Amino acid sequence: MDRRDAVLGYYDAIDAGDYDRLAALLAPGFVQRRPDRTLDGRERFVRFMREERPRTDTEHVLEQLCVSTDGTVFVEGRLLTVDGDDLFGFVDVHRVGEEGVESLTTYTA
């Protein structure tokens, strides 16, 4: 799986509410670390995105994407409402391996 395509697909799937596609992009042992919580496992993360996140009417606007040689993809962007209101900025650090996106560390501003 191309690292860049996997990460772009990750944001597209979340914004579209396509949780089957999201799950297919994530490795079974996927983990997300963010300032307020850690979500362990692909199923747990997808359940959170589908049923528990505070807002689902959002769009990720990516400003920069950088792919390193070790399987890390760095993304800088903004989270907007579907009406275009700015919620916050973020930097995501994705680790992508043979089985898909293995981990994500999110930093918000």
Image (cartoon, helix red, strand yellow):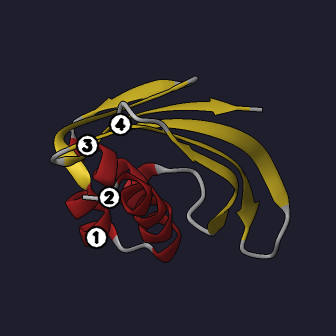
What residue sits right under mark 4 in the picture?
71
Per the rendering, the mark at residue 32 is none
Callout 3 amino acid:
Arg
Q: Return the residue at label 3.
A: 44
Query: Residue drawn 16% across and 48% down?
Result: 99
3D distance between C-alphas at marks 2 and 3: 24 Å
Q: CA distance from mark 4 to mark 1?
A: 21 Å
The Cα atoms of the two marked residues, 4 and 3, are separated by 23 Å
Which residue occupies the foreground of this view, 28 or 72?
72
Sequence-first tag of 2 and 3: 2
Q: Are marks 2 and 4 in contact (CB under 8 Å)?
A: no
User: Of the residues under marks 3 and 1, which one precedes in the sequence?
Assistant: 1
* Amino acid at the residue labelled 4: Gly
The answer to whether the residues at label 2 and label 3 have Cβ atoms under 8 Å apart is: no
Indicate the position of residue 71 as horizontal and vertical percent values: 35, 36
Image spot of residue 84 (x, y percent)? 82, 71
Q: Amino acid at mark 2?
A: Asp
Element carrying mark 4:
loop
Evaluate whether residue 43 shows in this view: no
Crowd tier of the residue under label 4, counting other residues whose Cα lies within 10 Å: few below 14, some 14–19, many 20 or above: some
Task: Residue 75: name its quadrant.
Answer: top right
Q: Residue at x 31, y 53 (%)?
A: 46
